[in-house]
């Protein structure tokens, strides 16, 4: 897509959202991954918009992703929450996968919390753990910044050495403590999917330095950092790739994430209390 047309779509989408909500969205956005969307329903004074109603917005087609934007308040903070995300494996381009983050950028969002479900590669993890993401490895074979470039989106060659903001991550760790959740940290590797990893692939990813693996998040983080949005992240370990001959199903992933959702909600509530 032509970069000028892409920018035009962003502006038109933002105008629709402002019309529906009656205001610009302030500081914070939260992207809620597979099975982790319930927290958004607890927001106060909610305005709910289905992705299918938003101009130019790609639809989420995956079980466990409600496909709704919810605007509301948590602990006095105005929040934009995405119940479900867009995945590269759904057949969307990287520009489409990162389009929601561009909307956040042009709405003035300054910080974003990303969440996801992941396979745990680190043997210190167990199923159901919530892990603070400290860095990522992009193994998706694509990047949302390839191709078109427009100065309004960011610089041509953004630095990713501090993609997960230290200040936000410190606040997130404090929220873990306040909610009574053990702090575990790790590196998240993103692959294209939609296959789950073979035992050999899981072993390779561990050698490369990954603690978790999933099929999302990294394109959103790249686009956010490119657009000047600070990022922190939490991953829910829903399975341990290569550890069972029976393998894993998406339904099992969603079920584990849903069980962890209440703890994630407590952490997000504490984060909003602690954040400036």
Image: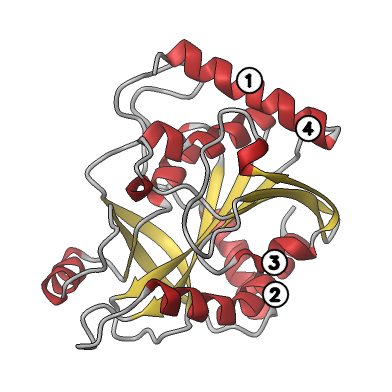
Q: Which mark is residue 222?
A: none
Q: Residue at x 75, y 63 (%)?
A: 41
Residue 158 placement: quadrant = top left
Q: CA distance from mark 1 to mark 2?
A: 34 Å
> At numbered mark 1, what does the secondary structure look like: helix, strand or loop?
helix
Does residue 79 show up?
no
Q: Residue furthest left?
A: 200
Which quadrant: the N terminus?
Answer: top left
Is the residue under label 4 in contact with that under label 3 (CB below 8 Å)? no
Residue denoted by label 1: 11
What whole-number distance in Å separates the C-alpha atoms at marks 1 and 3? 28 Å
Foreground pick, 113 / 197: 197
Q: Are marks 1 and 4 in contact (CB under 8 Å)?
A: no
Q: Quadrant of residue 97?
A: top left
* Labelled disc at residue 266: 2
Between discs 3 and 2, the one toward the N terminus: 3
| Front: mark 1 or 4 | 1
Q: CA distance from mark 4 to mark 2?
A: 26 Å
Work out whether mark 4 precedes mark 2 in sequence or the reverse, and give the earlier one: 4
Q: Is there a contact, CB below 8 Å, between mark 1 and mark 2?
A: no
Bin the neighbour count of mark 4 within 10 Å (Cα to Cα): few under 14, some 14-19, many 20 and up.
some
Q: Report x, y in % for residue 95.
A: 41, 31
Mark 3 neighbour class, 10 Å CA radius: few under 14, some 14 to 19, many 20 or more: some
Q: Secondary structure at mark 2?
A: helix
Does residue 148 show up? yes
Q: Is residue 155 above or below residue 32?
A: above
Residue at the spot 56% in from the left edge and 39% down from the top edge: 229
Residue matched to label 4: 24
- Residue 170 in the image, given as x and y percentages of width and height: 57, 63
**Sequence-earlier tag: 3 or 4:** 4
């Amino acid at each position: 897509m032509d970069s000028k047309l892409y920018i035009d779509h962003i502006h038109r989408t933002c105008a629709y959202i402002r019309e529906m909500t009656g205001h610009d969205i302030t500081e914070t956005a939260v992207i809620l991954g597979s099975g982790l969307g319930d927290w958004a329903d607890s927001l106060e004074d909610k305005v709910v918009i289905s992705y299918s109603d938003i101009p130019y917005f790609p639809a989420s087609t995956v079980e466990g992703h409600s496909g709704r934007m919810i605007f509301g308040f948590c602990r006095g903070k105005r929040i934009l929450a995405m119940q479900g995300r867009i995945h590269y494996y759904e057949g969307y381009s990287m520009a489409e996968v990162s389009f929601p983050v561009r909307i956040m950028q042009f709405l003035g969002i300054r910080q974003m919390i990303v969440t996801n479900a992941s396979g745990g590669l680190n043997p210190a993890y167990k199923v159901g753990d919530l892990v603070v993401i400290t860095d990522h490895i992009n193994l998706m074979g694509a990047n949302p910044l390839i191709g078109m470039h427009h100065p309004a989106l960011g610089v041509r060659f953004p630095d990713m050495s501090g993609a997960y903001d230290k200040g936000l991550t410190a606040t997130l760790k404090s929220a873990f403590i306040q909610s009574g959740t053990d702090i575990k940290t790790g590196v998240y590797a993103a692959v294209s999917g939609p296959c789950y990893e073979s035992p050999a692939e899981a072993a390779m990813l561990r050698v490369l330095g990954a603690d978790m693996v999933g099929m999302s998040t990294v394109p959103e983080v790249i686009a956010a950092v490119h657009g000047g949005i600070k990022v922190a992240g939490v991953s829910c370990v829903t399975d341990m790739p290569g550890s069972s001959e029976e393998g894993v199903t998406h339904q099992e992933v969603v079920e584990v994430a849903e069980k962890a959702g209440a703890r994630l909600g407590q952490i997000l509530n504490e984060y909003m209390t602690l954040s400036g």
